[in-house]
Image (tube, grey):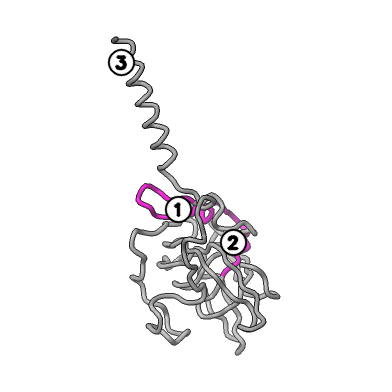
C-alpha cells in the first residue's frame, strides 16, 4: 500500500509539472489571429488625441499588463497584431502582421537614428508610437511568447548587433521604411532613412 501511494503521488506530481510547463508560456505561433481584431499600425493612442503628426507623442500610453523592455534598443515595447494598407484605399494591398510598438524610448536609444525622408525634404526620426516589424529581415514575432503575467515578450529585439537593417512604420504614414543603423557602437552609428518601393511589413 505504501509503494502504491508513493507511485500515485509521483504520477500526480509529474502530471502537475507537465501541465505547468505546457501552460506557462504561450508562443506567438499558437496565437489565433482570428480571435483578435488587428490594430491599425499607423495610428497610436486614442483616436483624435493628437492629430498633428509633427507633435511628439505623449508618454504614459502603455497598455495594461506591461511592456517588453529592450536594453539593446533602449525602450519599452508592446507587441500588437496589426494591419496596414499600402497604396490607395481602393487599390492598395493590405497586410496583417505582428509589430513591436515603441511606448517609451531612452534619450540615447539607437532607434532615434532611424529617419524617414518626408516629401518636403525634411527627415523625421523614429519616436514613441512608431513600429518595428523586422530586424535583418527576421520578423519580430520570431521566438515571441507570453510570460506568466500574460505580457508578450519580444526577444528578437535583443538578438542583433552591429549593422542592422530595420523595417519600421512611422505613425501616421501608411508605408514601410527600410533603414540600417549600427547597434551597440555609438562611435560609428549611422543614419538610415531611405524609403524603398512598397514592401511588406
Q: Alpha-carbon neighbours of circle 1 within 10 Å: few (<14), some, or many (≥20)? A: many
- Residue 16 in percent (x, y) is at 36, 32
Residue 166 lies, in percent from the top left, at 60, 64
Query: Of residues 53 and 71, which is closer to you in this image?
Result: 53
Q: Is residue 150 left or right of residue 198?
A: left
Q: Which residue is mark 2?
A: 134
Q: How far is mark 1 from mark 3, CA to CA?
A: 41 Å
Range of the magenta residues? 145-168
Residue carrying label 3: 5
- Rendered location of residue 137, percent (x, y): 64, 59
Residue at 37% over, 47% down = 148
Cβ atoms under marks 1 and 2 closer than 8 Å: no
Using the image, determine if residue 68 lies above or below residue 192.
Answer: above
Measure the alpha-carbon separation of dots 1 and 2. 15 Å
Classify mark 1: helix, strand or loop. strand
The reply to whether the magenta stretch includes residue 75 is no
Q: Secondary structure at mark 3?
A: helix
Mark 2 to mark 3: distance in Å? 53 Å
What residue does disc 1 label? 153
Amino acid at each position: 500500500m505504501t509503494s502504491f501511494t508513493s507511485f500515485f503521488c509521483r504520477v500526480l506530481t509529474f502530471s502537475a509539472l507537465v501541465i505547468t510547463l505546457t501552460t506557462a508560456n504561450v508562443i506567438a505561433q499558437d496565437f489565433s489571429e482570428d480571435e483578435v481584431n488587428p490594430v491599425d499600425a499607423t495610428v497610436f493612442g486614442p483616436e483624435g488625441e493628437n492629430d498633428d503628426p509633427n507633435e511628439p507623442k505623449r508618454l504614459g500610453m502603455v497598455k495594461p499588463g506591461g511592456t517588453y523592455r529592450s536594453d539593446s534598443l533602449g525602450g519599452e515595447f508592446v507587441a500588437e497584431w496589426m494591419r496596414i494598407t499600402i497604396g490607395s484605399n481602393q487599390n492598395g494591398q493590405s497586410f496583417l502582421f505582428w509589430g513591436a510598438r515603441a511606448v517609451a524610448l531612452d534619450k540615447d536609444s539607437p532607434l532615434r537614428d532611424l529617419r524617414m525622408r518626408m516629401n518636403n525634404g525634411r527627415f523625421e526620426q523614429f519616436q514613441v508610437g512608431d513600429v518595428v516589424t523586422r530586424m535583418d529581415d527576421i520578423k519580430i514575432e520570431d521566438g515571441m511568447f507570453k510570460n506568466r503575467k500574460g505580457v508578450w515578450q519580444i526577444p528578437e529585439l535583443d538578438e542583433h548587433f552591429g549593422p542592422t537593417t530595420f523595417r519600421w512604420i512611422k505613425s501616421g504614414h501608411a508605408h514601410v521604411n527600410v533603414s540600417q543603423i549600427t547597434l551597440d557602437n555609438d562611435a560609428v552609428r549611422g543614419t538610415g532613412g531611405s524609403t524603398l518601393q512598397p514592401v511588406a511589413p
